[in-house]
Image (spheres, helix red, strand yellow):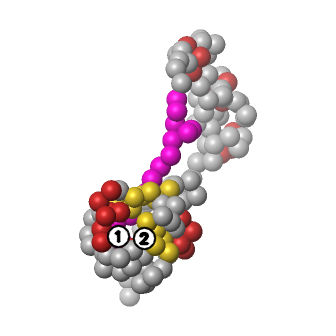
Amino acid sequence: MAQIVKPEGSTKKKTIVGRGASSKGRACGRGHDGQNSRSGGGVRLGFEGGQMPLYRRVARRGFSNAPFKVTYQAIGLVDLENVYEEGEVVNDASLREKGLLKGKESLAKILSNGEITKKLTVEGVKLSKSASEKITAAGGQVK
């Protein structure tokens, strides 16, 4: 029975850089001398050889309101119809409990996509005008 033999030169030993001259040859794949050839050598992130770095050349201007941004997650009446039972209260805590509202920072806004037949009480949640009308038409309450 014949043995399968791998072709010569198909595998090479992994080069381990910076482990002395024995690992690959004199410079071990790091070039000849210089800052990057030394152990611990190299420059910090953003360093441009002493030239004023880009992050210091570009002016910091203006003001951003991004830290104060309030994000709302859209929740349709279809979702409320599928998840809630007749007579339940819809609020921030119950939406999180049922898995409709995710994330610590986000708030909910109920939109009118779909129909609702169950009587639900909505408290402390933002609604669109048409969603509010559909909930009250179904016999629910908006507080």
Query: Which is more toward the observer, 75 or 91?
Result: 91
Can residue 140 be found in the magenta stretch?
Answer: no
Residue at the extreme left: 114
Gap between marks 2 and 1 measured at Cα: 6 Å
Which residue range is magenta in the image? Answer: 64-79
Query: Which is more toward the observer, 100 or 57?
Result: 100
Do labels 2 and 1 touch, CB within 8 Å? yes
Q: Residue 43: image x %, image y %?
A: 65, 26
Question: Can residue 34 be seen by looking at this rendering?
Answer: yes
Q: Quadrant of residue 141?
A: bottom left
Q: Is residue 45 above or below residue 24?
A: above
Q: Is residue 50 above or below residue 35?
A: above
Q: Judging from the image, what secondary structure is the residue with disc 2 in?
A: strand
Q: In the rendering, which numbered label is found on residue 141?
A: 2
Name the residue carrying label 1.
Answer: 136
In the rendered structure, which disc, 2 or 1, sits on the residue that comes first in sequence?
1
* Number of residues whose C-alpha sits closer than 10 Å to that of mark 2, classed few (under 14), some (14–19) or many (20 or more): some
Q: Quadrant of residue 126?
A: bottom left
